[in-house]
């Protein structure tokens, strides 16, 4: 525990003395010199050795000055924290000024050390792990929670953090902090079945502050939610298949009463919607649980684009839009064909759905050497910019009634986001209300393949 330095009280009451004026003290020395010279003068006249006695008087004065100098040096060298010796004249003033500034400095120092001590005590008391990492990636300081959560031991001071937290995901995060502003979830190496959320911040150049907290509860809840959605979707699948089978059989019967036929047609459209919802939920859950990077297939882009274009034509029959295909790249994509085809087709069906009849939809694929762009541009209803940040959330709809009317599940863009994430790609949306939108999937260079 920190004990502040004892700060001694001033030896004298200097309140009425103005130490800033050296002349006041020089006068004391001058008076002493005159005193010595007068005494020496009288004695010299008495014994008729005037100049010798004056010289001795000077020597006596010089001796008092040397004594003061000796005391000053002794104090500075041996007892700087003690009260300074009580000296008169210029030496006294000098000593006092040194002592006063030193004392003030020590008060400030004591305050600073106290502040650091308080900050350190509060970090020690934190439930979150805090680790200071220097420019060379070596551990400088950590709190007890870091020992509990991350397994840092007293002997680890000065060790490279990457030799302690060795998970590849952490090493990747350590070198690219800025790419993951929310930090990283890692499995605890100390506690079984525990998960830790790690977040790092750079400071003072290349030093890093690591803060970590136990998020096992959150992780378990999230896992429960995923399992629940996954299970319920699987459970719904079988009854839905049976229902749609029977409904289809009944709907196909020629001799059915027209009132019943309408009811069955509605049942058929609703079961189709439910089927689509269940399929989307299952796909989303698979995408979320599959932590591995997408398969590394080489996807023949011209062929995929043509297939998507043909499918778009089939879907477009009821809408009558003008469809354009614009391929301006010789690159293919590296990834999972099924998942990418499903993501791209979601963007295309959205463009068709959310464009009033007779619009124009352009499906494009191009690259600029650094990135590959799959884009879908429409002349549709557009989206108010305030909705854009939340668009890829599950079940987020700009206009719920309209989305339901068009048979949307509200999961399309969430699926697109996950598929793109698995391909290190991201979605960019530009849109203007009542003018149209452009959805662009942007792929990094590593995902492009060219002969
Ligand atoms: P949905 O199944 O409802 O279409 P999505 O996740 O595919 O769900 O899309 C989310 C919402 O984004 C939609 O409900 C719609 O409001 C809006 N949206 C998506 N694509 C477009 C588009 N091309 N033009 C206008 N709005 C769109």
Image (tube, grey):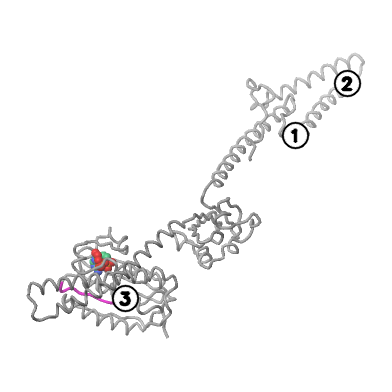
User: Which tag, 3 or 2, sits closer to the chain's start?
Assistant: 2
Residue range in magenta is: 357-364
The answer to whether 10 is drawn above or below residue 337 in the figure is above
Residue under the point 72% across and 35% down: 80
Residue behind label 1 places its C-beta within 8 angstroms of ligand 1: no
| Residue 86 placement (x, y as % from top left) | 74, 25
Label at residue 342: 3
Q: Give the residue drawn at x 19%, y 64%.
A: 402
Q: Quadrant of ligand 1?
A: bottom left
Task: Examine the rendered structure and indicate whether residue 94 appears above or below residue 177.
Answer: above
Rendered-image quadrant of the N terminus = top right
**Tag 3's secondary structure?**
helix
Residue closer to the observer: 38 or 401: 401
Quarter holding the C terminus is bottom left
Q: Are marks 2 and 1 in contact (CB under 8 Å)?
A: no
Q: Is residue 169 magenta-colored? A: no
Q: Secondary structure at mark 1?
A: loop
Q: Which disc number belongs to residue 53?
A: 2
- Report helix, strand or loop for mark 2: helix
Please name which of the two marks, 2 or 1, marks the residue nearer to the observer: 1
Who's the residue at 52% across and 64% down the image? 170
Residue 431 appears in the figure? no
Decide whether the magenta segment is chiefly helix, strand or loop.
Answer: strand
207 relative to 426 in the view: left or right: right
Q: Cβ(mark 2) to ligand 1 < 8 Å?
A: no
Q: Quadrant of residue 304?
A: bottom left
Residue 79: mark in rendering: 1
Asked whether 217 or 162 is in front, the reply is 217
């Amino acid at each position: 525990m920190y004990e502040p330095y004892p700060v001694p009280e001033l030896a004298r009451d200097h309140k009425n003395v103005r130490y800033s004026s050296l002349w006041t003290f020089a006068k004391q020395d001058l008076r002493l010199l005159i005193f010595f010279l007068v005494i020496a003068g009288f004695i010299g006249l008495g014994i008729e050795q005037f100049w010798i006695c004056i010289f001795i008087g000077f020597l006596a004065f010089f001796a008092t000055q040397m004594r003061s100098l000796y005391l000053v040096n002794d104090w500075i060298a041996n007892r700087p924290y003690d009260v300074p010796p009580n000296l008169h004249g210029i030496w006294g003033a000098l000593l006092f000024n040194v002592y006063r500034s030193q004392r003030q400095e020590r008060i400030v120092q004591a305050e600073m050390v106290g502040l650091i001590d308080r900050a350190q005590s509060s970090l020690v008391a934190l439930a979150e792990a805090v680790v200071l990492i220097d420019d060379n990636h070596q551990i400088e300081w950590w709190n007890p929670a870091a020992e509990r959560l991350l397994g840092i031991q007293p002997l680890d001071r000065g060790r490279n953090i990457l030799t302690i937290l060795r998970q590849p995901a952490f090493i990747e995060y350590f070198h690219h902090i800025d790419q993951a502003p929310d930090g990283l979830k890692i499995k605890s190496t100390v506690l079984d079945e525990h998960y830790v959320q790690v977040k790092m911040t750079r400071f003072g150049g290349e030093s890093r502050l690591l803060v970590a907290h136990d998020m096992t509860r959150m992780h378990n809840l999230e896992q429960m939610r995923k399992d629940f959605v996954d299970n319920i979707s699987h459970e719904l699948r079988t009854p839905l298949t049976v229902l749609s089978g029977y409904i289809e059989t009944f709907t196909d019967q020629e001799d059915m009463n027209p009132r019943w036929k309408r009811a069955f047609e509605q049942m058929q459209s609703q079961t189709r919607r439910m089927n689509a919802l269940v399929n989307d939920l299952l796909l989303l859950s698979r995408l979320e649980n599959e932590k591995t990077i997408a398969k590394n297939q080489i996807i023949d882009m011209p062929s995929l684009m043509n297939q998507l274009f043909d499918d778009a034509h089939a879907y477009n029959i009821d809408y009558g839009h003008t469809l354009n295909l614009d391929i301006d790249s010789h690159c293919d994509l590296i990834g999972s064909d099924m998942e990418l085809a499903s993501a791209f087709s979601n963007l295309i069906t959205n463009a068709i759905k959310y464009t009033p009849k007779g619009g124009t939809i352009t499906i494009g694929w191009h690259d600029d050497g650094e990135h590959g762009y799959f884009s879908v541009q429409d002349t549709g209803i557009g989206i108010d910019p305030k909705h854009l940040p939340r668009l890829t959330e599950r079940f987020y709809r700009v206009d719920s009634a309209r989305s339901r009317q068009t048979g949307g599940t509200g999961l399309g863009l969430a699926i697109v986001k996950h598929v793109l994430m698995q391909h290190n790609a991201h979605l960019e949306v530009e849109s203007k209300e009542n003018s149209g939108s452009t959805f662009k999937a942007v792929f990094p260079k590593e995902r492009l393949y060219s002969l």
